[in-house]
Image: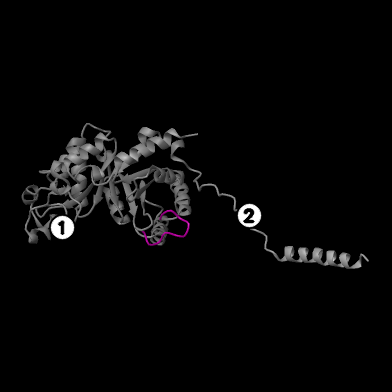
């Protein structure tokens, strides 16, 4: 009597196949995606000793900002210092960032702290200590006349300076640049295209930088307007890159804002137009982040940490396949 065992065996075989068919097949691990890279890479087009690093406000975090000493340090490092440009009450063009004195001038009355460069004469301004806020080793540093800075650039074609426009008569500024003979050594920086066009009409030989803050959406809108104008007068373009926690529009899976695909597309477009592509990655101290941005097609950096940035760029060039 073998019929019953055969029936049981058949039922067991069928049940096993039924449950096997119903059980979900484990999903295979996705293959790791290749890192996003731009087809354009700075190492193929720019020599290391020609790589432009902008030292924010002079020498970034390494010194007090917007003083002759800070600019000298920026040049010593081999970078392009940046100066913020304002005008005193009596018409002297100076290097100063903030619109009031509260942050960088110690020991002044509360009412004076609320005032700014445009409210005082140069004599009053030059009496202010703009170094002590940074540390005792910077005590006694003073605001610089821009004409003094230009004088230190004369005869030194390797010395360059970014001029970030805050409040100044462009014609008067251009006259001072021309008088010092450093037109090819300055880079006028502004988020306003009209300002750049006005400057290029005054000083055609000068380089210019259009900088774009804000969200990725805001940057896209700004770029559309620039395309309509064929990027006229712009020789450099800077985008601000912000990390999570600092930016509100970081997309899922992205390490920063704007997105990597945005940077890659812009890198190839600007390369085709012969425009230097720069970024200011706020707070960046990690070499790997600089390397990633270079892989995405960036060709220049502005930084608050020029020593860190310089080392990261040197290491990146040393890795060239």
Closest to the observer, 80 or 62: 62
The residue drawn where x is 44% and y is 51% is 263
Q: In the rendered view, would you say 159 is above or below 266?
A: above
How many residues crowd around disc 1 within 10 Å: few (fewer than 14), some, or many (20 or more)?
A: some
| Residue 36 at x, y percent in the picture | 50, 48
| Residue 69 at x, y percent in the picture | 17, 39
Figure quadrant of residue 1: bottom right
Magenta-drawn stretch contains 233? no
Q: Residue furthest top?
A: 155
Q: In the rendered view, would you say 14 is above or below 101?
A: below
Q: Secondary structure at mark 2?
A: loop
| Residue 7 at x, y percent in the picture | 87, 67
The residue drawn where x is 29% and y is 49% is 189
| Residue 248 at x, y percent in the picture | 37, 62
Tell me the tag on residue 28.
2
Q: Is residue 81 visible?
A: yes
Q: Which sits earlier in the primary sequence, circle 1 or circle 2? A: 2
Magenta-highlighted residues: 247-256
Figure quadrant of residue 178: top left
Closest to the observer, 221 or 98: 98
Q: Answer yes or no: do the residues labelled 1 and 2 have beta carbons within 8 Å?
A: no
Q: Give the residue at mark 1.
A: 100
Mark whose residue sits in front, 1 or 2: 2
Q: How many marks?
A: 2
How many residues crowd around disc 2 within 10 Å: few (fewer than 14), some, or many (20 or more)?
A: few
Q: Specify whether 144 is left or right of 14.
A: left
């Amino acid at each position: 009597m073998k019929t019953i065992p055969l029936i049981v065996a058949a039922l067991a075989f069928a049940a096993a196949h039924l449950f096997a068919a119903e059980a979900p097949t484990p999903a295979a691990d996705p293959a790791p995606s290749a890192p996003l890279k731009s087809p354009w890479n700075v190492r193929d087009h720019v020599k290391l000793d020609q790589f432009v690093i902008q030292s924010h406000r002079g020498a970034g975090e390494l010194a007090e900002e917007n003083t002759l000493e800070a600019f000298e340090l920026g040049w010593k490092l081999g970078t392009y210092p940046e100066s913020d440009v304002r005008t005193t009450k009596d018409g002297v063009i100076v290097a100063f960032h903030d619109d009031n004195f509260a942050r960088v001038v110690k020991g002044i009355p509360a009412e004076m702290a609320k005032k700014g460069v445009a409210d005082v004469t140069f004599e009053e301004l030059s009496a202010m200590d703009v170094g002590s806020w940074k540390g005792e080793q910077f005590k006694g540093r003073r605001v610089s006349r821009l004409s003094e800075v230009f004088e230190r650039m004369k005869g030194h074609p390797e010395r360059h300076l970014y001029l970030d426009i805050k409040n100044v008569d462009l014609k008067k500024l251009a006259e001072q640049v021309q008088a010092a003979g450093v037109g090819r050594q300055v880079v006028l920086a502004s988020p306003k295209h009209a300002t750049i066009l006005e400057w290029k009409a005054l000083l055609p030989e000068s380089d210019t930088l259009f900088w774009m803050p804000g969200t990725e959406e805001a940057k896209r809108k700004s770029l559309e307007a620039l395309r309509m104008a064929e990027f006229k007068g712009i020789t450099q373009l800077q985008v601000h890159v912000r990390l999570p926690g600092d930016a509100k529009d970081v997309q899922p899976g992205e390490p920063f804002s704007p997105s990597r695909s945005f940077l890659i597309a812009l890198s190839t477009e600007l390369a085709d137009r012969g425009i230097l592509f720069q970024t200011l990655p706020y707070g960046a101290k990690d070499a790997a982040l600089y390397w990633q941005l270079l892989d995405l097609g960036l060709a220049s950096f502005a930084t608050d940490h020029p020593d860190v940035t310089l080392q990261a760029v040197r290491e990146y060039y040393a890795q060239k396949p």
